[in-house]
Amino acid sequence: METNGERIETDALRNLVPLNALTVAQLQELSAKATLQEFPRGQYLFHEGDPAVEYIYLLRGKVDLLQGDRLAEQVVGGLALARFALAHHQPRKFSARTESPTLLLRIDSELVNSFVSWSESSGYEVAELGAEDTDDWMTQDVEGNVWYFGEISKTYEDGELTDIEGSWTAGVDGAKPGILMKAAPEVGDVYRQEFALGEAEDAGEVVSTTGSATVPAASCSGSCVVTRDFTPIEPDGEEFKYYLSGVGLILEENPETGGRVELVDVTFP
C-alpha cells in the first residue's frame, strides 16, 4: 500500500455519490481531508462484518466484492458503480479485494455522514442506481433449445449492492437447469425456466407465436414468440416477454402496472 501525496480536486468529488449533493465549501473540506492510496493486486481492503469507518471509492483499477468465497460483483474504475462507495453498509456486507493495481479515495465516514445529513435536510437529493441487475449463464443444445444454467441476481439500494438473494447455479445444492426457449415453441407449452427450491422457480408458458412489438432496438410484426412468465414463489406476479428470432428477448411487460423493459441496443458478433 502506498499513499499518494496528490490532492483530489473538488470537481472529481462531485462525480461521486452521495458527495454530489454537497456544497462547494463541503467538497473543499473533504478534498483537504481525503486520502488517495494505491494498492497492489490481491489486497483485501475490508472484510465482511467489518465496521464501515470510511467511504472508499475506486478511482482506477478493479475490485471484487465477495460474499464468503463467492464473487458477488466486480467494480471497475470509471464505470457507473465506481461512482458509489464500495459496499458501504454498517457493518460491511461484503469483503473487498483488489483484482488489479488500484487507486482508491478514502474519506472518514463520520465527516461524510454529517455533511450528507445536513444536505438532505436542506432538500438535496442523492442519485440512485437501478434496483436490480443479473449475470446469466445460457447455452444452446444441438436441437436448438436454449437452456438456462444459473444467475447472479444483484439487488441495489442507493447504488450499493445489498444482497444476491435469488442467485443459483445448476448442479449446486440440488439446482437444475431449465429451458428459456424451445427450438420449436407452440402455444400452450409450459416449462420450467429454472429450479432452485425456494430461490428460483420461474416457469414459462407460450401464449403466442405471432406477437407484435416495437422497441428502440428491434421490432416484430406477427413474428415474436410471447411467453407468460410466473413463479410459485410469488403467485400474484407475472410478466409477458417477447422474443424475436435472431435477436432474443426484446420486451418485458408487467400486466398489472403496465411497466415495460425494452431492448435499446444490440450488437451482433
Image (cartoon, helix red, strand yellow):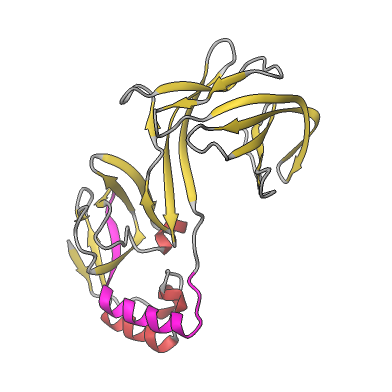
Give the vertical position of 169 relative to 5 (above or below). Answer: above
Q: Position of residue 264 (x, y in %)?
A: 66, 46
Q: Position of residue 42 (x, y in %)?
A: 21, 48
Q: Position of residue 196 (x, y in %)?
A: 40, 28
Give the vertical position of 196 relative to 45 (above or below). Answer: above
| Left or right placement of residue 98 versus residue 177 in this view | left
| Left or right placement of residue 216 versus residue 141 in this view | right
The extreme right residue here reads 221
In reply to whether residue 150 is colored magenta, the answer given is: no
Q: Which residues are magenta?
A: 100-126
- Is residue 269 visible in the rendered structure shown here? no
96 and 104: which is toward the camera: 96
Give the vertical position of 265 relative to 138 (above or below). Answer: below
- Is residue 178 visible in the rendered structure shown here? yes
Rendered residue at 38%/80% (across/down): 117
Rendered-image quadrant of the C terminus: top right
Rendered residue at 74%/25% (across/down): 208
Rendered-image quadrant of the N terminus: bottom left
Give the vertical position of 34 relative to 184 (above or below). Answer: below
| Left or right placement of residue 105 versus residue 242 in this view | left
Quadrant in which residue 40 is drawn: bottom left
Quadrant in which residue 238 is drawn: top right
The extreme bottom residue here reads 25
Rendered residue at 48%/46% (across/down): 133
In reply to whether residue 122 is colored magenta, the answer given is: yes
The extreme top residue here reads 143
Q: Position of residue 158 (x, y in %)?
A: 44, 62
